[in-house]
Each structure stands twice: as structure tokens, then as C-alpha cells.
Image: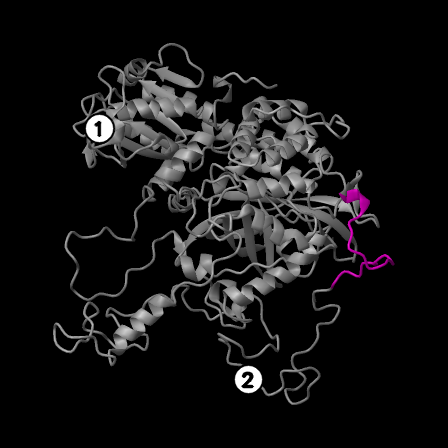
Amino acid sequence: MDPSKAAKNIKDAVETTAEKVAEKAADMMSHDIPGRPGPEPAPLEEPTAPREPLPPKPDQTAPDTRTATGAETGADEHIRTQQGAFLTTSQGARLRDSDHSLKAGPRGPLLMQDHHFREKITHFDHERIPERVVHARGSAAHGVFEGYGTATDVTHAALFAEGVQTPVFTRFSTVLGSRGSADTVRDTRGFSTKFYTSEGTWDLVANNIPVFFIQDGIKFPDVIHAGKPHPDREIPQAQSAHDTFWDFVSLHTEAQHHAIWNMSDRGIPRSYRMMEGFGVHTFRLTNAEGGTSLVKFHWKPKLGVHSLTWEEAQLINGIDPDFHRPDLVDAIDAGAFPEWELGIQVFEDNPEQEFGGIDLLDPTKIVPEELAPVQPIGRLTLNANPTNFFAETEQVAFHPGHLPPGIDVTDDPLLQARLFSYIDTQLTRLGGPNFSQIPINRPHAPVNDMLRDGFHQHAVHAGVAPYKPNSLDGGCPFFAGADDRAFEDTPVRVTESTKVRANPATFDDHFSQARLFWASMSPVEKEHIIRAYSFELGKCYEKAIKERQLQALANIDPVLCSEVATALGLPAPAPTVDLTQEVPSPALSQVGGAYPPDGRMIGIVLDEEGDMSGVEALRTAIFGAGAVPLLIGPHGGMVGGLEVQRTFATARSVEFDVVLLAGRPAPAPDSLANRDDKGGAPSGPGLDPRVQLLIDEVWRHAKVIGAWGDGVAALEAAGYAGRLTGVVTGDDAATVFTQVQELMAGHRVWDRFPVAVS
């Protein structure tokens, strides 16, 4: 997103009229505070009167009700949900009991004739399917993509025409971890979107990092085997801080550019909503006149690109390993729909397939946005959660070869390998060749493919001639003519050559773009990269691996190498390549710019004995700004006539983007070390130790803090007196929140702490 545009968005949000604030607040408040599990409040007693199943929650949707061949049925999207008030077998026979097996007497052995037990347990035994080898841990949402009409000069793909709205399903994921791993590990993230276009499905299979570890797909098993847990002990899980990963990366220096991105803050995103996406590869577009262009795809988040601090990530992995999942679900539930702009960098389709000396077929290279600006071509809005995680998020199948007319692939050797690998993977995971007939994968365009039979065939095909040519079925299906918008493989001339196992010479530069990334970082981001390398290499056992990686760092930047070497207690080697000075690319830095507060979580600490005036109006103002207020009290239930969402025992700083102090709460009755470990921590005089810890952590994590009235006394008791960077104090909540909003626009207050590296 253009920083000036982002700054204008924030300015507009801060200066919104009272009427618009009230309207926004009413809209936000019409949604539940995130966390309600069902569409209705649960009664105290178990319901016994038969009734139809409850509908899905308002924020949930399901795949379109289409046939296996893509036709609309006109049925309600939730027609596939449970039917009827009574428990039945899979064949619809009603059951009177599902708690007791059929036995030979109350104490006797089970009887084999218990068909209900056998059906129930057999289905349970087979509930799981093989998890993905990579990207196993994922979260997803439904949405819509609207074209701007700005891409029609480079592609005739219908979804990019002005005003065209295309249903989508987007899945975010981590690469290395298993399905049960934590969300906030240091890793690359997947950002894959399935566009159900009128001309066939398009899968944009992207990552949150624009380059990859390898240049040729034949090495994909190597890099994944190196990053996965050690095969002898199955540890460590979902992380790269171990010998096998750094052994591969230090030997295979083409991986150094991706590695430095992973060691930056990009490796630990704050939220999927605040994550950039990249198509990684170069694609070829064709316009209506047959002209071609080379492009790279970019997703730009409305909220900006932000990350967790390392300490936050470590805390979250223990406190809430599912952190990114509820963040996405709750934002949609609260009506703060995540948005991204899709943009393209456009390059001439020249015979060399290069731009400014950069090989566009090398997936370990980027083209700086300052050299080729990203041109917005459409907007993605995620506005509905899945109805069923397994049926949708787990069974969705992406493939880079799912392309509509107007979009084609290039000869990038990693992309070429993926065109085979993705289909091959789906055959095993989803039980056969008919995975496209699973509801979440069904196209929204008519399907007449002549593919027949196989496991899980849902279509009931008519006719007798699934072959071409035929006369028995009247010749149907027919080939599409030039005016029928058929997909055409772009007739690219292939240079005459000899079959070899080799890379072009342009693939040999492994360090200049890693050097570009380092040069583009702000001082605080450089500190974080140094910390990440020091931690990861410090976890390696073999000294030789550390020394080898230090040599790679020396070829990137001497300061980076020296600082990491000092942390490892090893000498810093001299570079073995020329350290050319790279021109920084400001677009690569996450620091700077201003962004809207949509969906930000704001914790408000309450004091039951203090002044609660202004808190209700503050909640309305926060809702009006598009953020979500969470009240933090000494106990559950009501405090001062307001219902709390967190208590001192259950709240932790990592949940909140901002913390506001409405009082100075004394130690609550449960502030006991043997009841809550945090309750035994030292604190300022008369202050609950859990509140002290909350203040300490948000201070360390460079978050904005606001206080008024007795809240100022709480800050002073905690040891934060005087004028402090990123701390706003005042006489009333409204004045404080106005200033807090301005600071929130920058995400964090990085200038709170000095840095050693410039």
C-alpha cells in the first residue's frame, strides 16, 4: 500500500465526524465480542426438547452448492449441514442411545451385531487423512475479490475487469510444522487463494516472503528434509533453529536470501491480517490482442505489514499456540474484515526474460519496487469463516497449474516442478483423482472434462462416449474456438539447446540480494535480524556449521557477521566476495508509514473500587475507530456495571495491541502464588502483580500505553513515572484515546529503545 494513502486512511479515521463514529461503533457493536462459540447462548441445563439444528453463526459460510460438474443448484449454502432434530445412523435411521454398546448383559462382552457401534467407531478410526507434507498447519476464510479494471491492458482474464466480483477461499499456513504445531514459530507462511472465476478456477499459491530457498524444484525434498525435525529423534518441531537446516543453508548458498528474510521480523508475523503475500514466481499474462507481459503478483495488506517481537512469540507459543487462528476468526466475527490489494509488477516479455540485470526466472531474486512499482489491480476482502474446518480448510487443494485464460506460467525451474508436485500430492492426500469434486474445490464454471470413475466420483455422468472424437454423444463436448475464450498455452519460442542438468550463469549470484535486504532494514530491524541469527545458530551443536554460516554472513555484511560471531563466541571471517554497495529499497522495511486501526485489540484495565466514568463512552469510541475493546477486570462477570472479557488471571499482554489503564487495581483475592503463578510476582505498592506484569511486558514490546485518573497512579506505582516514549496520560479517557490513536498508526513505538546498529 502507498504510505501516503495509508496515512490518509488514518487521518480520515481520526478526523471522522461524530455521526460516522457513531455509525461505525453501532456496526462494530452489532457483532459479538470475539469468542462466542455458538449462535445462541448455552443454557445452564442440557436441552432435552427436540428441535432442529441451530444455524451456523452469522460470520460463517460454506462452499457454494454446486454439482460435481460446476452447475449452480440454487439451494441454500448450508443445505449440506445436519438435518433433522434426531440423532441417526449414516443411513438416516433414528437412534435411541449412543452412550452404551450392545452387550450380552450389563456386564457382558460386546456383541458383534452392534452395527451402530461398528459404524461409529469405524468412521472415527478413519477421520484423519494424511496431513500435508508442508503447509500442514493452516487457517482459512471465504471472501470476495473485486477487479479494478486496471489490468485489462496486460491480461484478458475476466476476473480483473472493473467491478467483477469473484468468490474466493484463502488459506494461510506455516511451512515446516505439523498440524499440531504452534502458530507463532519463526517460519515462512503460505498465502494461497482459490479464485472461483467464471472461466475456471485460478489458484494463486503464494508466500509471505517473495523468494524461495532453492532455484530448482528437484531440490525441494532436500530443503524440506533439512528444515523438518531430525529424523532420528523427531525434534525440534516447527522451527529452523537446528543443525540440519543450517547445514543445508550454509552449504547451499542460494538459500541465503530467503534465510535472511526468515531471520527478519517477517518470520514471525503479528497476524495473517498484517502479512504481505507474494506469488514468488514470474508469470506470463496475455491481453486481448495477444500481447504478452511478464509479471510478479503482490498482496498488500490494508493494515500494513507488522510482526511480533521475539519475546512475544515465545510467550504466545506457551500461552496460546493457536494465536493466529482466533485472530483471523475473531476479526471476521467482529466485522473487521481483513483486506488486501492485489498488485502486479509488469515487465517486458523480452527473449532474455530479465529486467535491469535481474533474471526473472530465478525464484531467489526480487525486483525492488522502486525499479518496478506495484500496480494495484483488485481488492480481496475476507468476510466469512468456514462452517467446517475439515471439509473446507483441510480439504482445499491448490495447484499453480489451475489457470484461467489470460494467465500462464513461465520456465522458472521451481515453478515447473510445482506443476507436477501439487497434483501428485492431492492424489495421495485426498484419495484419488476426483479431489476437484470436493465441495470446497468445485469450480464455479461448467465442467465437461470426459474424466470418469475413480475413488469418490460424485458426478453421475450421462452419455456413452467419454472420448474425442465421437458421434454417439452428438460430438459433445466440443473444442472451444478462437472466440470462445479458451485457455491457450502462450506460444513462447524455446531456444535451441542441449539437454543438460545445469543452471544459467545468472543464477550464480547468491549474496547481492541478501545484501540489498540488509541495507534496506531500519536499525531496529537489523537488531532483530542479529538476534535471530544468534539464537538460531546458538541452537546448533556443530561448530563447523556455525563457522560455515558465519562465512555466508560475512559475504552479506561485515557488521551482521561480526555481531553474530560475537554472540557465538567465534571469530568473524573475512568476506570471499566483493561487497558491492546496494541501493536500499524502502519497500522492504516494515517500519514507517501509518495504518488504520481496524481489528486492533485494545485492553482496558478496570479497578472495581475506582472511577468507572468514561469507560462505556471509551468502548463506543474504540468500536467507532474500527478496533475491538476488551475489558480486563479483577474477576469475571460484571465490574462497575460492565461485563469483562478478560481477568487479571486470564489476560496476557500478547493479546493486546494497546493497553489502557482506567484505574489502579489493588491485589485481587486470587492474587496468590499458589493459585496463579503470576500473582506471586513483585509489584509496585498497592498494585495487583498481574497488572504490573502486563505493564512491564507491553513496555518491553514497544506497545502504546494510555492512562488517566487513577490509571496514572498505577503507572507510577509500576515504576513508569514522568514523560515516557509512547506513554499517553491525561485527565480523561477521550483525550488520552485521541493521542493513543495517533501512536497506534505506527503499530509500535520503536524509538522507545536505543539501538546499537545503524
Q: Is residue 506 magenta?
A: yes
Tag on residue 462? Answer: 2
Among the two numbered marks 2 and 1 on one chain, the one whose residue lies closer to the N terminus: 2
The disc labelled 1 sits on which kind of residue?
Ala
* Nearer to us in this view, 305 or 516: 516
Query: Is 325 rendered above or below residue 547?
Result: below
Bin the neighbour count of mark 1 within 10 Å (Cα to Cα): few under 14, some 14-19, many 20 and up. few
**The quarter of the displayed image where residue 654 is located:** top left
Residue 560 screen position, x and y as percent: 62, 25
Kindly indicate the quadrant of the structure image that contains residue 32.
top left
Q: How is the image coloured?
A: one colour
Q: Position of residue 662 (x, y in %)?
A: 28, 23
Q: Quick one: 590 or 233, which is closer to the camera?
A: 233
Decide if residue 755 is in sight here: yes
| Residue matched to label 1 | 673
Region rendered in magenta: 489-507
Residue under the image location 19 percent in, 34 percent down: 638
166 sits to left or right of 484: left
The answer to which of 326 and 111 lies nearer the viewer is: 111
Residue at the extreme top: 722
